[in-house]
Amino acid sequence: MLDTKIKFYKGRVALNVLAKDLANAKEIYEAAEGHVVVGLLSKNYDKIEDGVAEVKEYLKELGVVSVGLGAGDPSQFEKAALISCETDPGHVNQVFTGAGYAAGALRAKGHGRTYINVLMSPTGEPGKVKISTGELSEKEKAAIVDVDTAVAMLKDMRAHSVKFFPMGGLKSLEELKEVAKASERGNLELIEPTGGIDLENFEEILKVCVESSIPRIMPHIYGSIIDKETGLTRVEDIKKLYEIIKKLVK
């Protein structure tokens, strides 16, 4: 089990959300009693050093950061990896083809406390996932493979987690169940359902993961809890999500 800096509720669940700024992030962190990881998106930085500086600023206050791509943008994979290897943030998002690059970059810097996820996408067929999520491969004919094979490849690359995206809310729920089963069979430490998750469907999606034997779960909830006028992630929504977590995780 990774010696993570992330605080999981009862060792199992942490939220992954965005914040408008550090003040909003600190409010979110307090509302979830620390069981949350705030994402900073590589796409927002023109230079790697700019991303490194902001991640370090957030780390001083929160202790952990999720370095993201930006709406799953595969062109950001290298930037995310390089920001992470300079900061050991605790969590980094990767496309399938970028995970090995990120793992090598982190290892070269002597870091061992950052989770690396691997983006796999739904196909409409439970038990099959799309792994051609990279900068060039996403433009070619879709590479669709058995989910157990994809999990084994993830482990080959020394990554830790499936980021199942874009789920489309409950649209891919049956596929998520198969991803969870494959993650169990592959002895993965973490699973991350992502895409279209909101206050209405969060409990049903989280329940699928909680009922598995996967040790840790990190649902990503983004746009649905962001106030469109202010750009702030709503603290009251974080509290509601946290209450659902406490209800499901005994």
Image: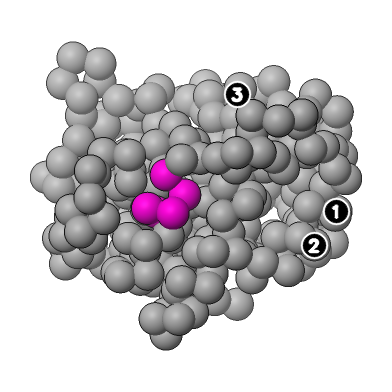
How is the structure coloured here?
Answer: one colour
Element at badge 1?
helix
Kind of element beneath mark 3 = helix
The numbered dot on residue 169 is 3
Determine crowd level at label 1: few under 14, some 14-19, many 20+ residues with C-alpha closer than 10 A.
many
- Residue 34: percent from the left, percent from the top? 31, 58
Q: Are marks 2 and 1 in contact (CB under 8 Å)?
A: yes
Residue 178 visible? The answer is yes
Q: Classify mark 2: helix, strand or loop.
A: helix
Question: Alpha-carbon distance for marks 3 and 2?
Answer: 26 Å
Q: Residue at 67% x, 47% y: name it.
A: 209
Give the amino acid type for the residue marked by disc 3 in the picture.
Answer: Gly
Query: Which residue is most to the bottom?
Result: 110
Amino acid type assigned to the residue bearing label 1 in the image = Asp
> For the magenta stretch, what is the residue range?
76-80
Labels 1 and 3: the sequence-earlier one: 1
Return the x and y of residue 208 as percentages of the image width and height: 71, 41
User: Which residue does the numbered mark 2 point to in the structure image?
Assistant: 152
Does the magenta run of residues contain 77?
Answer: yes
> Nearer the viewer's eye, disc 1 or disc 3?
1
Q: How many marks?
A: 3
Indicate whether residue 245 is drawn in magenta: no
Q: Which residue is mark 1?
A: 148
Residue 201 in the image: above or below residue 163: above
Q: CA distance from mark 2 to mark 1?
A: 6 Å
Amino acid identity at mark 2: Ala
Q: What is the distance, in whole Å, between disc 1 and disc 3 at their CAs?
A: 23 Å
3 and 2 marks in contact (CB < 8 Å)? no
